[in-house]
Amino acid sequence: MRTSCLGAAAAVIGLVSVALAQPADMVNWWKADGNANDSAGTANGTI
C-alpha cells in the first residue's frame, strides 16, 4: 500500500487548531475545552 505525503500532511493540518484572542469588550467566553467554565466572566455553565 502506498501512502501519499500530501495526504499525511493534510491529516496533520486538520489536527491543528487556531487560537483567537479575546475581544476587549467580551462579556462571556466558553472555550469548549471539556468544561463549561466561563473564561471571560462569571457565567459558568453546567455539562
Image (cartoon, rainbow, N blue to C red):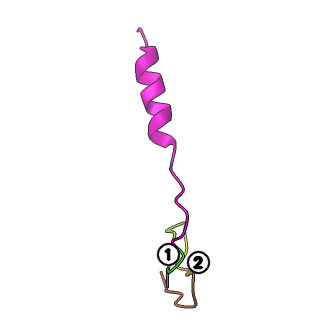
Disc 1 marks which amino acid? Trp
Disc 2 marks which amino acid? Ser
Query: Magenta span has 36?
Result: no
| Local crowd size for mark 1, using a 10 Å CA cut-off: few (<14), some (14–19), many (≥20) | some
Q: Which residue is mark 2?
A: 39
13 or 41, which lies in front?
41
Residue 33 image offset from top left, x and y in percent: 55, 66
9 or 20, which lies in front?
20
Q: Residue at horizontal 51%, vertical 51%?
A: 18
* Tag of residue 45: none
Tell me whether the residue at label 2 lies in contact with that at label 1, contact meaning CB atoms closer than 8 angstroms: yes
Residue 10 image offset from top left, x and y in percent: 42, 29
Where is 41 relative to 3, above or below?
below
Residue 29 image offset from top left, x and y in percent: 50, 77
Residue 4's quadrant in the figure? top left
Q: Residue at horizontal 47%, vertical 35%?
A: 13
| Local crowd size for mark 2, using a 10 Å CA cut-off: few (<14), some (14–19), many (≥20) | some
The Cα atoms of the two marked residues, 2 and 1, are separated by 6 Å
Q: Which residue is mark 1?
A: 30
Query: Residues in magenta?
Result: 1-23
Circle nearer the N terminus (2, 1): 1
